[in-house]
Image (cartoon, helix red, strand yellow):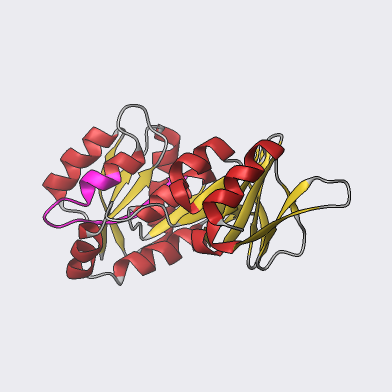
Amino acid sequence: MLRVLIVDDEPPSRERLGQLLDEIGGVQIAGQAATGLEALEQAARLAPDVVLLDVRMPGLDGIETARYLNVLHEPPAIIFTTAYDQYAVHAFETHAAGYLLKPIRKDKLAAALAHAGRLTRPQLRQLAATTGARGRTHVAARRRDQVSLIAVEEILYFQADQKYTTVRHTQGEDLIEESLRTLEEDLGENFVRIHRNTLANTRYLQRIVRDADGHYCVLLRGCSTPLPVSRRLAGELRERFRV
């Protein structure tokens, strides 16, 4: 029987999770917490097998709470529960056992608990030991009620258009709500600004050409459409990457 700690700053959400756990069965509610600090205190005292952890909380948010939970002598498996899909990447970087979008469905919760239950304590300690040891490796995109992770190494470019940003990758394209500025800061030298609305993956750069009108464009491997390059950046790109 899994011992579960419920962490959410909203009482109705904690109550809903408790009801779902009762319906699923095979679990014991070890305790409940309304803040990240309470979660850490209870986890250290109760040693739950699984923590159902809300991401967006005042004070210590769920992502930071997870990082601290991971350094416990007996770290629990963590299943994030949130209404906001933009936290998925950071959640997976903390090696979460699951990531559930609200409103949470019983079958999704049951599946996440089943997965968490298969992780042994040595496995959890090994996963926790690697938290923060690497940079951002994925970008999260929402597809209906699912969150899909796109590997950074498979992304050809990002292109901003008003509220959304298009992610073109080797398997197609998706929309995300992250800004180019945030992506540029997170991904560092792996991506280069070729236009005010476009970030390109440097590993796919082929060459810079001029079209019939004399405008600069960049050609990427795996992408049939030339991407506009601002005149200001064209010379810098050619010199830096010799393309």
Residue occupying the point 41% across, 63% down: 112
| Residue at point 40%, 41% (across, down) | 55
> Is residue 147 shown left or right of residue 160?
left
Residue pushed farthest right?
212
x and y percent of residue 173 in the render?
68, 58
Taking depth in this image into account, of 231 and 80 the one nearest to the observer is 231
Which of 114/243 is in front? Answer: 243
Q: Pick the quarter of the image with the N terminus.
A: bottom left
20 and 135: which one is in front?
A: 135
Q: Position of residue 140 (x, y in %)?
A: 53, 52
Image side of residue 40 versus residue 153, left or right: left
Residue under the image location 33 percent in, 65 percent down: 116
In front of the other: 106 or 231 = 231
Is residue 100 a member of the stretch shown in magenta?
A: no
Q: Residue at x 58, y 39 (%)?
A: 180
Q: Residue furthest top?
A: 59
| Part of the protein shown in magenta | 66-84
Q: Position of residue 223 (x, y in %)?
A: 71, 64
Residue 153 vertical placement versus 211 (above, below): below
Question: How many numbered badges does the structure rendering display?
Answer: 0
Q: In this orientation, does residue 194 appear?
A: no
Query: Looking at the image, can residue 146 be seen?
Result: yes
Q: Would you say residue 80 sits in the magenta stretch?
A: yes
Q: Is residue 12 above or below residue 168?
A: above
Residue 59's image quarter? top left
